Image (tube, rainbow, N blue to C red):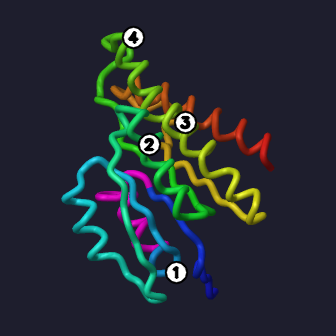
Amino acid sequence: MNISLKNRHAIVCGSTQGIGLAVAKELASLGATCILLARNEQKLQEVIRELPAPDRQPHTYEVADFSDPETVGLAVTRIIESYAITILINNTGGPAAGPITDAAANDLEQAFRQHVICNQLLVKAVLPAMKAATYGRIINIISTSVKTPLPNLGVSNTIRASVAAWAKTLANEIG
């Protein structure tokens, strides 16, 4: 199968390591222009240098800390001023491990902001360009814990299930 993402612009969140980095490399190799979004500028610069550019795509990045939704909102505003985003990869590291009975209310609130609120900000910003292009892909990287909660990941299990419900609701609404 020959897939080309030439002339597509993708925001890849959490793209300096792990799944986010692997996704960014793959999208770039398929011709997408990748706009990386993560909190560590030095790592972002390193990844930009590593990304393939078979179509000479001008990959770039914005710095944002998903523990502070305001930084995510400001970053995506800057991105959409220059790029019509048609691919969004929502990917953020998980909350600290531990039983749900040990979690403080603030732990749940922070995880909700980091995952659901930031995802919502990103989608609201990029959806108009997707609709205008009559093309859009929103991919939410979550966890197998949405099917069966994993031991000692109380906050993560709870928040990942919330993201799954949010994503399904979004899919039902926008098709």
Q: Residue at x 70, y 58 (%)?
A: 130
Q: Is residue 118 left or right of residue 152?
A: right
Q: Specify whether residue 11 is in view.
A: yes
Dot 4 and dot 2 residues touching (CB under 8 Å): no
Say which residue label 1 marks. Answer: 30
Camera-near label (4 vs 2) is 2
Q: Is residue 165 left or right of residue 33?
A: right
Q: Which residues are magenta?
A: 13-27
| Distance of label 3 from label 1 (alpha carbons) | 30 Å
Say which residue label 3 marks. Answer: 146
Q: Residues within 10 Å of mark 1 (few under 14, many from 20)?
A: some
Residue 35 in the image, given as x and y percentages of width and height? 44, 63
Dot 3 and dot 4 residues touching (CB under 8 Å): no
Which residue ends up furthest to the left in the rendered image? 42
Most foreground residue, 43 or 104: 43
Q: Secondary structure at mark 3?
A: helix
Question: What's the residue type where badge 1 is placed?
Answer: Leu
